[in-house]
Image (tube, grey):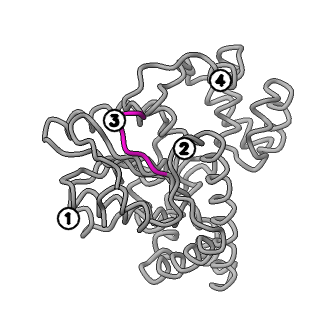
Amino acid sequence: MAQRKEAGGAVLIAGPTASGKSGLALAVAERRGGVVINADALQVYAELRILTARPSPEEERAVPHRLYGHVRAAERYSVGRWIAEMREALAEAREAGRLPVIVGGTGLYFKALTKGLAPVPAIPETVRTNLRERLAGEGPAALHGELAVRDPVGAARVRPSDPARILRALEVVEATGRPLSDWHREPGGTPLVELGEAEAVVLDPPRERLAEAIRARLRAMVAAGAVEEARTFAALGLDPSASAAKALGLRPFMEYAAGRLGLAEALEAAAVETSQYAKRQTTWFRNQMGAWPRAATADEAGERLGGR
């Protein structure tokens, strides 16, 4: 087992959805007097506990948890806001003498945490409003086509069916005259956690095992009330491009709740959607976090981190 660094250090646990990272983080925090801090862009939303696989109320009572379910679905949430909140969470953890155990599946958050955040200027609200109106009228494919002309590198990284990321890339080039990919090459700010001073691991389970875990978790979500949560979310009437609306399985279960899909169809659609997302996460981790140690299972990682 690797030597553990307590004072000033942190434990960083990344991995694709359904890889067991949240359970591992809880075990490490329980064993080592830690606080679990969220690094997942969707687990911040209050209305989506089940569909984003947020820790249960019982788990949150077992050890302190931070940055979970504290944002309303209608709010815009960004990596910049997450970094600001993470700075406060780390300061509170260290003041209390607790080990920060940072866990999630959003690779960009870990990149910002350990390498600093690219200094993208604030975007005027008028630019955002104009682009949202165009998205509603023209559709994401049309805006993706424009992005391909104005920022070919950025367009190649964004799917034509991902309106939130298309809007972000377009608003940056519209407001600053420079593509987002250019800004990301700028030197970032000071990292909040030095990778060399942290214990880090990426969970990288075999694809078949992960696919089984995804399907099992979706069935458990349905039993726990995922359909009711999706129905309640639909009643909010939010813009489909809202970040919270990207929750995995949300749309298939909304379709089932509305009577437009059968349960088996909704489960299958959610499983396909989630597996595709997990594949993209794994690719990102391999390309962007190649130096991080890997573990095929949460148990293997727990042996290294003192959570087993």
Q: Secondary structure at mark 4?
A: helix
Q: Secondary structure at mark 1?
A: helix
In the rendered view, tell whether residue 65 sits above or below residue 225.
above
Label 2, residues with CA under 10 Å away: few <14, some 14-19, many ≥20: many
Q: Quadrant of residue 50?
A: bottom left
Task: State which tag comes first along the sequence, 3 or 2.
Answer: 3
Q: Provide the residue designation for mark 4.
A: 172
Q: Provide the residue designation for mark 2.
A: 107
Mark 2 belongs to which amino acid?
A: Gly
Q: Provide the residue designation for mark 3.
A: 85
Mark 4 belongs to which amino acid?
A: Val
Q: Nearer the viewer, mark 4 or mark 2?
A: 2
Q: Is residue 199 magenta?
A: yes
Q: Provide the residue designation for mark 1.
A: 62
In the rendered view, tell whether residue 157 sits above or below residue 247.
above
Mark 1 to mark 4: distance in Å? 42 Å
Q: Secondary structure at mark 2?
A: helix
List x then y, in percent, for residue 115.
49, 28
Q: Nearer the viewer, mark 3 or mark 2?
A: 2
Q: Nearer the viewer, mark 3 or mark 1?
A: 1
Task: State which tag comes first along the sequence, 3 or 1.
Answer: 1
Point out which mark residue 178 bears. none
Magenta range: 195-201
